[in-house]
Amino acid sequence: MAELAALEDPKTRKVNEKHGDDHGVHLSKLRALAKRLKTQQELARQLWETDDTAARLLAILICRPKAFERDELDVMLREARTPKVHGWLVNYVVKKNPHSEQLRLAWFSDPDPVVASAGWALTTERVTKKPEGLDLAGLLDTIEAQMRDAPDRLQWAMNECLGHIGIEHAEYSARAIDIGERLEVLKDYPTPPGCTSPFAPIWIAEMLRRQHDK
């Protein structure tokens, strides 16, 4: 914890706080520290218990993803607080855990929109890597009905799912683009030059164009 405190940088904290993350450790320094520590599951659990954002990010980097029990991960997600901790926990730990599908189903319809966003992120992973058994048309129905009025993080997760359904499954591309055009979610999202807009119709069309050009 003292070492993490020594890595704290006020400028980094200022940037992170704009995104809702309350820490000031540059991620490259955090990754270097994790590389030195290597995998240490017990230390990871202790770091998580501190409730410190930088410590929790480090915990995620040095933990053994498959070693967590289902209920343990459920509690951790609900404790995650900040967007970066939440995102890393889902992407680096839950997706690699044998209970990921159970958690996807449990979180998908959770009344807490931040927890539900994790369920949608895991669903998007299935859309791209293991779509067998998913009701893609049903997912589009839900997105069409709920995405426009969803809270920010849940809306973003639903939009990612919409985009990937349109990109990965040609038979749904036209419908996914149509839903995006009618809902206009993220239509005016500020996009840096050279980057693709997260607005689903533009994003889907661009990715399909790239696939076609290959």
Image: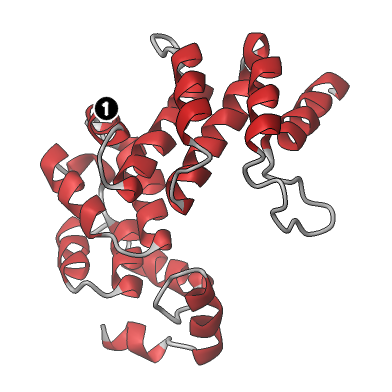
Quadrant of the rendered structure where residue 201 is? top right
| Left or right of 55, for residue 158 | right
- In this orientation, does residue 138 appear? yes
Using the image as rendered, state which of residue 97 and residue 101 is in the foreground.
101
| Left or right of 104, for residue 8 | right
Where is residue 196? Give x, y as percent: 76, 45
189 shown above or below 170: below
- In this orientation, does residue 167 appear? no
Where is residue 205? Give x, y as percent: 78, 28
Quadrant in which the C terminus appears: top right
| Residue farthest toward the right in the current orientation of the protein | 213
Q: Residue at x 34, y 51 (%)?
A: 89
Element assignment for label 1: helix
Quadrant of the rendered structure where residue 11 is? bottom right
Q: Residue at x 52, y 45 (%)?
A: 156
Where is residue 106? Give x, y as percent: 22, 32
Q: Residue at x 25, y 42 (%)?
A: 111
Amino acid tagged 1: Leu
6 shown above or below 149: below
| Left or right of 16, for residue 100 | left
Total marks placed: 1
Quadrant of the rendered structure where residue 211 is? top right
Residue located beneath label 1 in the image: 105
Where is residue 148? Give x, y as percent: 53, 40
Q: Residue at x 29, y 72 (%)?
A: 55
Quadrant in which the N terminus appears: bottom left
